[in-house]
Amino acid sequence: MKPNLQVTIAGVSLKNPVMNASGTFSRENADFVDINRMGAVVVKGVAPEPWPGNPPPRLAETYGGMLNAVGLQNPGVESFIRDELPLYKQFDTKLIVNIVGRTADEYAAVAERLRDVPVDLLELNISCPNVKAGGMAFGTDARQTECVVAEVKRRAAQPLIVKLSPNVTDITEIARAAVAGGADALSLINTLLGMRIDIEKRRPLLANTFGGLSGPAVKPVALRMVYQVKRAVTVPIIGMGGIMTGDDAVEFIMAGADAVAVGTAGFANPHVFMEVVEGIERFMLTHGIRDLQEITGAAHETVIP
Amino acid sequence: MKKVVDGVVRGNNPLTATVYDLWLSVPGLFDGNGDPPNKAGQFVGVYVGKGEHLLPRPISLCETRPEEGLIRLVYQIAGQGTAHLAQATPGQVLRLIGPLGNGFRAVESDSHWLVGGGVGTPPLLEWAKTLRARPASAPCRIYAVLGFRGEPFLTQDFEPYCDGVYVATDDGRFGFHGNAVELLKQHLRPVTCAGETAATAALYACGPRVMLRALAAWAEPAEIPLQVSVEERMACGIGSCVGCAVHTRSDSGSIYKRACKDGPVFDSREVAL
């Protein structure tokens, strides 16, 4: 009997729990992935107006991962609605728009602009560590997190996922603050702040000095945070951080994630998105699991309180 | 169309201490009609390892042999990934993604000058072949001007397709003692009684930024059309992650374009080198 991979995030039904991580995927990936078979597509961060991003070099490889300091280059919400949205709507999958801003009002302005636009969910990116002008501050401070979430919720129509930064002392504090502000779901983790040094030039390799670490190297941290947040909130959780296979995704689901996102793995293997879906399905088949809810958060049941 | 394909190593031999010549059988890249799978100037992403090296290494296509389903990649050991690649042996399978990027565009002119610096030279070989293969209604003279810091490589491979191959070495061990730009200026003057004039020339260059900058500084005021192939660190290679930003000059101020998708070939006036 075919396992049921359907999941619901904040009232929105996804055909399976696998989506891409924001910033790693675009329509260009359609050459390698049947986007119709993804649970959702997540658009990279959209700002109120075009953001140029950081100067190059923006990328560096690390052992089992990579650093990026792209700096949220994006053409702005008007360009997204006019030029990109129609192309995404061709696909039979849910559409999640990641929104960025330098102030609470900027985030809310993007959300408001998307009110009557056919987008299924918003993802509030308060956690990207690459923006100098205050973006980092929101996601590392509980009160600012609650405020910005509340402001966006006041002006948004679609349900709101809040994407958390791991660069904090206590992720559960930020998670609770986001929920207090009205978050309908949480996604975590964003990238970990890191750097590399060019030993010939004797200076940082990235033009921005620091960048965000992603890929398999961060998986243990991401899993730990999903596990902790699961014990702290009751809203749905989208887990991500170094997922390369269906088995990795199952780890996140057992840690408490209702859905998962795949990012860096797509650079190493453009076909990975379907492989993760099929891997989850295979795990369910071989273990007689009919429904993902049977294993969501399963790792917690064995913990002695 | 871009694909992920597996190729079988047919040869992976050093041309110099740090430059290797990799031939791959990749029938999956060819359409079976005898056409090259790529435009000259395009590249492939080579997946060199699993955990330690996640990102594909972008390497320009040096040559293709459609009738045999072969591609040739000439690359330099620049870091851990390419060092790993240098150990690949015949029979080994390598996964690739490609063809990626845009290619050179032929500018109508009497003479085409292909200017290569070091490991920027390989993609110009495919371009020389392409230009030479153009129908007789577009007659043109093709010259290669190739500069190397030390030991030259690949230069003889240009000879069947070019009316002249000129080689420069920084240390003077072979050919002209100097760099490719200085050598080019010896052959291509603004006004000349005999030989080529800059007024009827088109330039296509690939090599270190400092070479491209020097070339642009000379060619642009003289209004010689110049296309440059630039290099930038990449992750996805297909235009999604916006990591490989190239600073461009545009009417509305500078913006960033993607080396992997909008490039790697740009009109020199488009980019801030």
Image (cartoon, coloured by chain):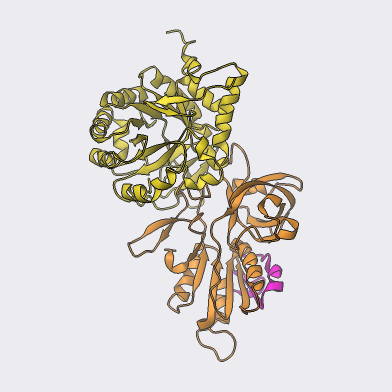
Magenta run includes residue B168: yes
Taking the image as shown, residue A285 lies to the left or right of residue A182, namely right
Q: Position of residue B193 (x, y in %)?
A: 56, 92
Q: Position of residue A177 (x, y in %)?
A: 29, 25
Counting every numbered tag in the picture gives 0
Q: Which one is in front, B123 or A55?
A: B123
Answer with left or right where residue A173 lies relative to residue A259: left
Q: Depth check: B113 or A120 in front?
A: A120
> What residue is drawn where x is 33% and y is 31%?
A160
The quadrant holding residue B18 is bottom right
**Chain part drawn in magenta:** B150-178
Q: Is residue A37 magenta?
A: no
Q: What shade does chain B have?
A: orange
Res A240 visible: yes
State the image quarter where residue B167 is shown: bottom right
Eyeballing the image, is B153 above or below A229? below
Task: Give x and y (percent) for residue A201.
Answer: 48, 52
Q: Residue at x 56, y 26 (%)?
A: A280
Q: Give how far across and how far down residue B212 sits, in percent.
A: 50, 67
Location of the C terminus of chain B by quadrant is: bottom left
Task: Check the image and name the residue furthest to the top.
Answer: A304
Q: Which chain is yellow?
A: A
Residue A71 appears anywhere in the view = no
* Residue appearing at x 32%, y 51% in the figure: A50
A223 displayed left or right of A119: right
As displayed, is residue A250 above or below residue B262?
above
